[in-house]
């Protein structure tokens, strides 16, 4: 029997098959998963901002791409995942508000997406799938038994990547 492991906003967690890890309500935030297909270990971080160095109150590592993704990688290794087998998937990064292109709020989803790709490249982890951008929220689930990443959005069919 599988359990649902919930990841809140500015949060992260790791689980193993047959469990499912999920986060709700990704808007401009990113839900990034790492998955080891051999060990069937999955992890997810739900981060809000791309860079911890631009804010003085940055003690919550899961709130930021630069610190959250690295912490997730560390926890995956502690759980027994093989770094060379890891695959990443991302969802979210939407433009949720109609504001000027130069606005930080209006552009944060895109900046979060760019940060994920940059950090994954630095860590030499392959990004195998993404569902990012546009203007709608998403709820996501990583099924650790299969590695399938389910993306659910209001009035849209469920997408599996």
Image (cartoon, grey):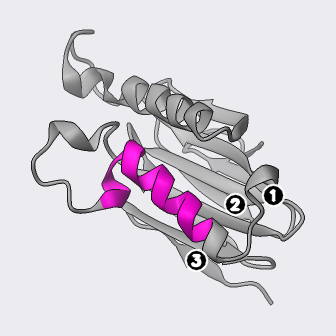
- Marks 3 and 1 sit apart, C-alpha to C-alpha, by 15 Å
In the rendered structure, find residue 5 and report the number of the disc placed on it. 3
Q: Residue furthest left?
A: 56
Is 73 in the magenta? Answer: yes
| Residue 23 relative to residue 159: left or right | left
Is residue 21 positioned above or below 123 on the image? below
- Residue 131, how many percent across, how many down? 63, 34
- Is residue 14 toward the left or the right of residue 88 in the image? left
Locate residue 39, reporting x and y percent: 84, 71
Q: Are marks 1 and 2 in contact (CB under 8 Å)?
A: yes
Residue that mark 2 sits on: 142
Tell me where the magenta segment starts and ends, as one range.
Answer: 61-76
Q: Which residue is mark 1?
A: 147
Tag 3's secondary structure?
strand
Q: Quadrant of residue 68?
A: bottom left
Who's the residue at 47% across and 65% down the image? 12
Q: Label 2 crowding class (10 Å Cα cut-off): few <14, some 14-19, many 20+?
A: many
Q: Secondary structure at mark 1?
A: loop
Magenta stretch: dominant secondary structure: helix
The C terminus: image quadrant = top right
Q: Secondary structure at mark 2?
A: strand
């Amino acid at each position: 029997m599988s359990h649902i492991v919930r990841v809140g906003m500015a949060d992260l967690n790791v689980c193993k098959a047959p469990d499912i890890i999920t986060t709700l309500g990704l808007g401009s935030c990113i839900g990034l998963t790492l998955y080891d297909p051999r060990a069937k270990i999955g992890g997810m971080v739900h981060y809000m901002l791309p860079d911890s160095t631009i804010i003085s109150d940055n003690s919550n590592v899961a709130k930021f791409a630069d610190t959250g993704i690295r912490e997730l990688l560390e926890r995956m290794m502690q759980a027994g995942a093989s770094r060379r087998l890891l695959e990443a998937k991302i969802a979210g990064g939407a433009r949720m508000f109609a504001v000027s292109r130069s606005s930080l709020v209006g552009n944060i989803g895109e900046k979060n997406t760019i940060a994920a790709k940059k950090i994954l490249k630095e860590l030499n982890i392959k990004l195998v799938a993404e569902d990012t951008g546009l203007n709608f929220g998403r709820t996501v689930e990583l099924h650790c038994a299969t590695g399938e990443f389910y993306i659910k959005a209001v009035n849209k069919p469920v997408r599996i990547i």
